[in-house]
Amino acid sequence: MMPADMLPIVLHHGLMGFGDICVGPIKLRYFRGIDRAVRDGGHPLIISRVHPTGSIERRARELKRNIERGLEQSKGDGNRVIMIAHSMGGLDARYMIANLGMHDRVAALLTITTPHRGSPYADWCLENVGRRLGGLKLVKRLGLDVQAIADLTTDNCRKFNREVKNVPGVLYFSISAARPWHRVPPWAIHSHKIISDAEGDNDGLVSVKSSTWGEHLGVWPADHWHAVNHKMIVEIKQRTGSIVPYYMKAIRRVIEEL
């Protein structure tokens, strides 16, 4: 069996996310610089690519296929993996582990700013944009799958947590992120206020309260986008800088527990 410090690592994106995308000579990476650091650390790497706005179940089934294909290509089919999942991706991973027979393939799951208990902002969007403004009717007419918004409401995540339990033998870790409202991107100020009023400290989309699951490894000084190393604001004071060292420290902590 491969030692823990050499296990394949899966990087799984969140809502509206993507795998590696090439636009001409330019390669866009969701986990910016994090993927390179993981490879440099000696871990085989699997980067997921699932439906950006589909349901948790749909994304989880696609994630399972991503992992199985990645292990086959890397000739690591007999290995377990360490999963690192950002945002909604953590819910996909939990569903996959518990309900899709992948509990024996995942050694540990580390969720990064995942709304385990849902998001008050998803509640707001569903009620105001989806129902009052007719957004749900429009997307249905267009044939678009945006079930993710409903799946991320606090009510639906409460139901999710009753039905999707942690599986013995898999280690669960979580990391939160938080910044004050004046240190998140301009488009996140509204969501930050809604979440702050309901649940307190948050990263612009997910609260510390909601993102805590399993063994909590701390709160990063970052917004939701900076948590995958996409810096959307200019840091002048109290600079966080690259988030990559935070990931590598968390990975070492997870490996110590395996």
Image (cartoon, helix red, strand yellow):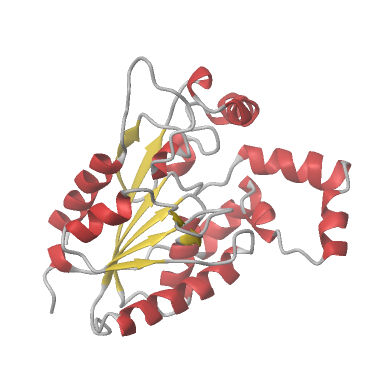
At 65% across and 49% down in the image, what residue appears?
Answer: 155
| Residue 108: percent from left, percent from top | 28, 62
| Residue 134: percent from left, percent from top | 88, 48
In the image, residue 37 sits, relative to residue 165, either above or below, namely: above
The answer to which quarter of the image holds residue 234 is: top left
The answer to which quarter of the image holds residue 176 is: top left
Q: Nearer the viewer, residue 95 or 25?
A: 25
In the image: residue 141, left or right of residue 114 = right
At 59% across and 71% down in the image, what residue appears?
Answer: 58
Tell how many labels: 0
In the image, residue 254 sits, relative to residue 96, either above or below, namely: above
Q: In the rendered view of the protein, which quadrant contains the N terminus?
A: bottom left
Q: Nearer the viewer, residue 2 or 245?
A: 245
| Residue 46: percent from left, percent from top | 34, 68
At 64% across and 38% down in the image, what residue appears?
Answer: 121
Q: Nearer the viewer, residue 176 or 155?
A: 176
